[in-house]
Amino acid sequence: MIFFETYGDRLITAFQVHLFYVLTSVTIGFAIALVLGILLSRVPQYAKVIMPLLSVFQTIPGIVFIGILFLYLGMIPATVISALAVYAIFPILKNTYTGLLDIKKEYIEAAKGCGMSPFQTLLEVELPLASPSIIAGLRMSTIYTVSWAVLAAMIGLGGLGEFIYIGIASNNDQLILAGAIPSAIMAIGLSLLIDVLRRVVVPKGIRSVK
Amino acid sequence: MIRFENVKKKYGNTVILDNLSFNIEPGEFVVLIGPSGCGKTTTLKSINRLIKPDQGKIFVNGQEISQVNPVKLRRKIGYVIQQIGLFPNMTIEQNIGVVPKRLKYEKKEIQKITRDLMEMVDMSFEEYAHKYPSELSGGQQQRIGVLRALAASPPIVLMDEPFGALDPMTRATLQKEIGKLHKKLNKTIVFVTHDMNEALDLADKIIFMEQGKIVQMATPEEMLANPASPLIRDFMRKSSLATDPLNLTAADFMSANVISVQKKKSIRECTDIMARQHIDSLVIKNEDETYAGVVTIKDIKKHGISSGTIGEIEPYQNITSDILENAKDSFDKLYNSGDNYVVVLNNDQTVAGIISKTSMATAMADTLWGDMQ
């Protein structure tokens, strides 16, 4: 308990900063991924080339990417957020794209035949049907981002990574756990939150199917 | 109502529609039929612009459709697709209301339409309106598929093999229902199928297509009497004996050549007929053509050849079978009863034919080895 007296306030701040990084970057990543996924699903012939190119990004180690951005943008939260957002994009993008392409053609044809415009078809048929897949992508991105956000501390921008880095440097197990356990709790908590979101977003009629 | 003028469509080098011209009158039930790849579905889909022809003109309600906004056009044409195609993310009520909603109908009005339509096919609004398609059986789903096409009361409804995926019993029921709906609502219906029985049952006019051309456009009676090509003849024979023996119905095995008489015929005349036809029993019909029973030569002997009518003799209640009944069930009946044949009845209780052991053997040989007649 002495530990909390010493580090309690810092831990709470670190937790908040960490959460802030995760939420903003995932939100930005989600918006970009959704739009990009929809656009790519309209032109699957190009997507076949573009998707593998984007997946190359994913293979660059986060530590390198944050390092490079740091050189250009400097030590500001935007560096961390944009790096994390870029990483958050891919799982959501991939799931949005495949989710939209996996929809059976007859639903699209039925929608067309019922006189829905392409935009109405997207909004009322395609996105609802792809929503389980999109939400699954969102969950993956969120959990990854919680762990990647640890890297923020590497360029001195706080978050739970701070405890882990200091703990490693000073060989203090308590500090490492103080960073790791809250990150795990955050990942689980956000994942539960996404379950709630899933229940709201995914239409009842297809929940049992998927 | 719908007019095709020299419509052509090619996919690569394959000609799909070859200079197609025809005319469909308002209120007609037209069935497009032909071997796969004959262009029947392409023809259907060019009516609501899901497919765009390369050349030629299509008129719907006097308007050339390439000049009409496709989205607006489709809201005025009901469309039922092959694989049901109900939106799984919407309730039954929302599915039926898809087109009325686009047309900005009031919520209350949509609900009333849904209720009325569901009533027409004997589905309770309270029970089903808020369910999702996955909670319904295939037959119920396709009923809703048909209702969705009717919801905004379009004058034209297109149906692309709507009952193809259903089991024979459900298909028969839905065929009956669609026939009723057509009579009641007076829509122009264009219906694609590869099942000749379905075509003969439903159509006012059948368009038989082959390689993008119309081989024959005629009423079912005409087509049955004078098929324009050997292929059509073949199609009618094959269709009437569905490939899967489990799908065969009493109709496939019966002999339609039944000697039947009305009750008011004199007994003397009846014995004459029996003598001439070398038969020992007659099927007796009521005045309204419905089935009354069977009178055998023994019954007549017992009664005495008087000058009375055949109606005076109490007819024997021979075993009967519904025309759509599974053939195997009819056979079982025939074997388990002592009767010499099964009388096959149409839906309206008129006599369609009989299945005797002889007609059964002929039909079985027919299925196994081809045309025996």
Image (spheres, coloured by chain):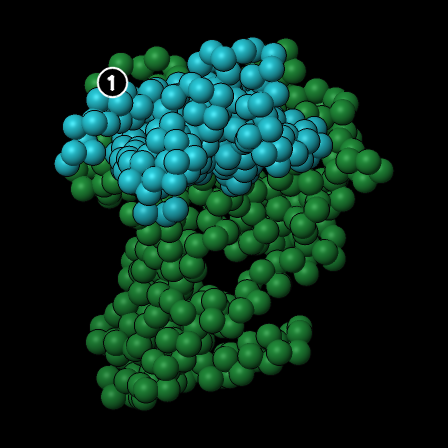
Residue at the (25%, 18%) spot, across then down: B107
State the image coordinates of residue A164 (x, y, percent, origin top left): 38, 34
Q: In the image, B247: left or right of B153? A: right
State the image coordinates of residue A47 (x, y, percent, origin top left): 66, 30
Q: Residue furthest front?
A: A170
Q: Secondary structure at mark 1?
A: helix
Q: Is residue A25 above or below residue B236?
A: above
> On what subunit does the disc labeled 1 rest?
B
Q: In the image, A38: left or right of B116? A: right
> Badge 1 is on which residue?
B107
Callout 1, which amino acid? Answer: Lys
Q: Is residue B166 above or below residue A110?
A: below
How many other residues sit within 10 Å of disc 1, few (<14), some (14-19) or many (≥20)? few
Dividing the picture into quadrants, the one containing residue B232 is bottom right
Residue at the (25%, 76%) spot, across then down: B317
In the rendered image of the structure, the colour used to display chain B is: green
Q: Is residue B66 visible?
A: yes
State the image coordinates of residue A128 (x, y, percent, origin top left): 40, 31
Q: Is residue B342 above or below residue B223?
A: below
Q: Is residue A109 visible?
A: no
In the rendered image of the structure, the colour used to display chain A is: cyan
Q: For this rendering, which residue is in front, A14 or B1? A: A14
Q: Is residue B262 above or below residue A150?
A: below
Q: In the image, B116: left or right of B83? A: left
State the image coordinates of residue A185 (x, y, percent, origin top left): 28, 38
Residue at the (45%, 80%) spot, across then down: B356
Q: For this rendering, which residue is in front, A113 or B296? A: A113
Q: For this rendering, which residue is in front, A2 or A69? A: A2
**Which quadrant is the N terminus of chain B positioned in?**
top right
Q: For this rendering, which residue is in front, B289 or B198? A: B198
Residue at the (36%, 24%) spot, across then down: A159
